[in-house]
Amino acid sequence: MLFVCLGNICRSPAAEGLFLHRLELRGLSDAFVVDSAGTGSWHVGKRADARMIRAAEARGVVLPSRARQITAADLQTFDLILTMDPSNLENVRKLVPAEAISARIEPMTAYCRRYRTDAVPDPYYGGADGFNDVLDLLEDACDGLLDALLERRGNG
Ligand code: 4NP
């Protein structure tokens, strides 16, 4: 699966790291290919925002990502693309004609069980609390996502 936000330095690297952490805890590290990308290109090659790295580290979660921009090929290579907000979703869909998309594209928040929202808020221009809020929301979504994927796989 590919997690996608705008810059690929805050929300999608956090989702990627949290999901990888959960896979590791459950002995499932080899079960999925996990990556993240941004719809924008400003931060290509950079590690996640230092504020997000610190907030994740405080929860024992490492963020391994280097920013990259999503490509048309990603829409064929990945089975599942998880977007962080409605604008990301629209931008991903606009990359190529619908016939060239084989991936399932879904809002990450569709997998939340404790939160009810259609967007993971962009913490980039806000204060430190924003990063922790995003991690809380993404933890909920990652738990829901992993359970849903395991259930789908179990059902054939
Ligand atoms: P992200 O946050 O999409 O969660 O990585 C952003 C980071 C940087 C910018 C926008 C969003 N930016 O405009 O530089």
Image (tube, grey):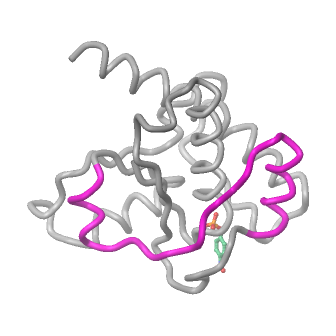
Residue 141 visible? The answer is no
Q: In this view, does 139 lie above or below 118?
A: above
Q: Whole-percent x and y of residue 2?
A: 42, 54
Q: In this view, does 104 lie to the left or right of 28?
A: left
Q: Is residue 76 above or below residue 23?
A: below
Is residue 28 found inside the magenta-colored segment of the image? no
Residue 109 visible? The answer is yes
Q: Whole-percent x and y of residue 136?
A: 75, 37
Name the quarter where the C terminus is drawn: top left
- Farthest top residue in view: 155
Q: Whole-percent x and y of residue 149?
A: 39, 27
- Farthest left residue in view: 99
The residue shown at (28%, 70%) is: 94
Viewer-nearest residue: 32 or 42? 32
The residue shown at (50%, 70%) is: 38
| Magenta-drawn stretch, dominant element (helix, strand or loop) | loop
Number of marks in the rendered image: 0
Q: Is residue 155 left or right of residue 134?
A: left
Quarter of the render that holds ligand 1: bottom right
Viewer-nearest residue: 99 or 16? 16
The residue shown at (24%, 69%) is: 73
Q: Which residues are the magenta region?
A: 49-78
Q: Is residue 77 left or right of residue 63?
A: left
The residue shown at (41%, 40%) is: 32
Is residue 76 found inside the magenta-colored segment of the image? yes
Q: Whole-percent x and y of residue 5?
A: 53, 62
